[in-house]
Image (cartoon, rainbow, N blue to C red):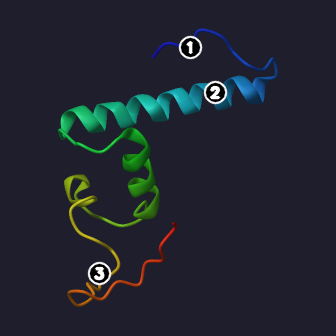
């Protein structure tokens, strides 16, 4: 963990910056240990969504939480931009 400078001078801002650095470091350890492909941002978003559920961290990005509805072939509801 390398914190080069502190952006605030109060006790609360220093603690907050240290906590953010620790969380980032833990996300990096999780990514390396489980050989996860997604970015740290995607991993943190996934962890926030299932924070109080018991689940294997390797399965967070493998299965969708909302059922995916695939439209029939040739039927697209996407608007054209140009």
Task: Name the side, left or right, on which 18 lies relative to 60.
Answer: right
User: Crowdedness of circle 2 by 10 Å Cα count: few (<14), some, many (20+)?
Assistant: some
User: Crowdedness of circle 1 by 10 Å Cα count: few (<14), some, many (20+)?
Assistant: few
Q: Secondary structure at mark 1?
A: loop
Instruction: Give the residue at the far front of this rendering.
Output: 82
Q: Which residue is mark 3?
A: 68
With respect to residue 45, does 79 lie above or below?
A: below
Task: Name the side, left or right, on which 21 lies relative to 15.
Answer: left
Task: Name the side, left or right, on which 58 lies relative to 23.
Answer: left
With respect to residue 80, does 50 lie above or below?
A: above
Mark 2–mark 1 CB contact (< 8 Å): yes
- Percent position of residue 78, x then y: 43, 78
- Report how far apart the C-alphas of labels 1 and 3 lie in the structure: 42 Å
Nearest to N terminus: mark 3 or mark 2:
2
- Report how far apart the C-alphas of labels 2 and 1 lie in the structure: 9 Å
Q: Which mark is residue 3?
A: 1
Is residue 19 or residue 39 the one in the foreground? 39
- Percent position of residue 20, x then y: 56, 32
Q: Which mark is residue 51?
A: none
Residue under the image location 46 percent in, 32 percent down: 24
Total count of labels? 3
- Percent position of residue 48, x then y: 46, 57
Instruction: Give the residue at the far right of this rendering.
Output: 10
With respect to residue 20, does 56 lie above or below?
A: below
Q: Which mark is residue 17?
A: 2
- The quadrant the N terminus occupies is top left
């Amino acid at each position: 963990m390398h914190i080069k400078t502190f952006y605030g001078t109060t006790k609360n801002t220093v603690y907050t910056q240290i906590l953010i650095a620790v969380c980032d470091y833990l996300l990096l350890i999780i990514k390396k240990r489980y050989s996860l492909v997604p970015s740290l941002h995607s991993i943190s978003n996934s962890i926030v969504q299932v924070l109080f559920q018991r689940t294997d961290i390797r399965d967070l990005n493998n299965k969708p939480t909302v059922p995916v509805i695939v439209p029939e072939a040739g039927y697209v509801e996407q608007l054209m931009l140009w």
